Image (cartoon, rainbow, N blue to C red):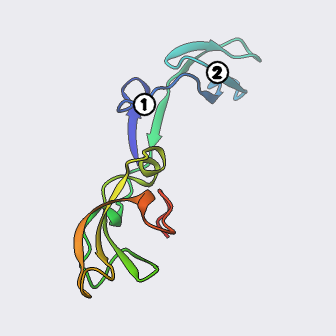
Amino acid sequence: MEQVNWRTMKGQTVDYFEVQVVCPKCGGSTIHFGEPDTTEHCGLCGAAVRVDLTIRLAAPVADPWRKQAPLDQPHKVFTSAGWEWRVLKAYASPVGERTNQYARWLCAVKSPWTYDDFEWGDTYIRDIPGAVPGQRS
């Protein structure tokens, strides 16, 4: 996990947070809401307690769908009425696919009009019967 200062969270906005602060003098704890990097006073002994906040962001998880798969090992296969869609690559994250009506996948498509061969190209996810944007399993 990577440590990131709350002020430089790679474009993420922090409007509110909550952190439990332990007093070094008496060991009492209090919940601190709001602005980090401030000084609070212990509710038990009155000692000044510095609130330093470091937010830990999980390391990004590699999405295997973002890498192009070979035709014989597609990420997923959809079939309907003599058509076959082999998903070879996704261009967006699952969250991005759910929020974008124009999300697309690189597909190899076989239909009754392609003479038992595949035609390759980008396909809107919404145009593939049975495909749900953001659903990868």
**Could you give the CA–CA distance between mark 1 and mark 2, rounded to whole angstroms?**
18 Å
The circle on residue 66 is none
Q: Residue at x 26, y 88 (%)?
A: 116
Mark 1: few/some/many CA within 10 Å (<14, 14-19, 20+): few
Secondary structure state at the residue bearing disc 2:
strand
Residue at left offset 39%, top offset 31%: 9
Q: Mark 1 against mark 2, which lies toward the viewer?
A: 1
Viewer-nearest residue: 42 or 70: 70
Q: Residue at x 30, y 75 (%)?
A: 109
**Is residue 19 shown left or right of residue 135?**
right
> Which residue is under mark 2?
33
- Give the structural element (helix, strand or loop) at label 1: loop
Residue occupying image coordinates x 69% and y 26%: 31
The answer to whether 27 appears left or right of 118 in the picture is right
In this view of the protein, which residue sits in the foreground, 126 or 134? 126
Q: Percent position (x, y) of residue 14?
A: 50, 25
Location of mark 1 (residue): 12
Residues 128 and 133: in front is 128
Name the residue type under label 2: Phe
